[in-house]
Image (cartoon, helix red, strand yellow):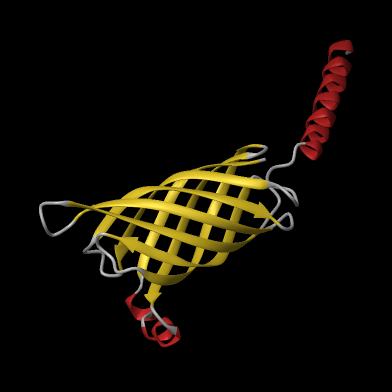
Amino acid sequence: MNKTKLILAVSSLFLASAFTAHAQYGFGPEVGDWELTLGGNGSTNKDFDNSGGGIGASLGYFLTDSFEVSLRQSVNYSNGSSSDSDWDGSTFVAIDQHFGTDNLRPFIGLNFGGLYGDTTSDTWAAGIEGGLKLYVKEKTFVFALINYAWTFNDSDGATDNFDDGAILWSLGVGFNF
């Protein structure tokens, strides 16, 4: 009988402390937090017959607990049609809306920036994006991001080139601070 009461008391204390710890332990950013991501990325045309890969990094700032503005930089390598290798880069500004308050955070957003390098004419690009962040610690996460981007040199090209866009993806790790 005493063992039963002891087990119930210890179990109750354990559950109470677990719920209290969960309430105090929040995942994700807070308003004013910065975010740094590092990852590998890739791209392919919409027909999946021309692709490349590279590395990327981003620095973001949370205007609210769920709305982020970020600057992304990537450097990409591809084996072009010639025997030489080609290097390209991109610089984008993005805005993302995150959903949820637990450790799994989906997000959607828009981006705008430039593409440049050996295999592309220097041009503007815009995109729609979505992704998922899985917080493995309070301020540390792994992420997946997919983006459909299209290039243009003027406002007419922005609408005309939408059907000729490319799919870009990135996987990596990130930190809020």
* Residue 67 occupies quadrant: bottom right
Give the residue drawn at x 30%, y 62%.
Answer: 44
Instruction: Judge by depth and name the residue closer to the eye, 165 or 15.
Output: 165
Instruction: Judge by depth and name the residue closer to the eye, 94 or 9.
Output: 94
Instruction: In the displayed orientation, state which residue is furthest to the left.
Output: 83
* Residue 3 occupies quadrant: top right
Image location of residue 84, percent across then percent down: 14, 51
Instruction: Judge by depth and name the residue closer to the eye, 37 or 108.
Output: 37
In the displayed structure, does residue 131 sit left or right of residue 56?
right
Image location of residue 100, percent across then percent down: 68, 55
In the displayed structure, does residue 73 sit left or right of residue 48?
right
Give the residue drawn at x 28%, y 66%.
Answer: 120
* Residue 161 occupies quadrant: bottom left
In the rendered image, which quarter contains the N terminus? top right
In the rendered image, which quarter contains the C terminus? top right
Q: How many marks?
A: 0
Instruction: Judge by depth and name the residue closer to the eye, 80 or 25.
Output: 80
In the displayed structure, does residue 10 sit left or right of residue 124?
right
Image location of residue 72, percent across then percent down: 50, 55
| Relative height, residue 46 to residue 37 (above, below) | below
Give the residue drawn at x 73%, y 54%.
Answer: 65
Image location of residue 125, percent across then percent down: 42, 71
| Relative height, residue 66 to residue 34 (above, below) | below
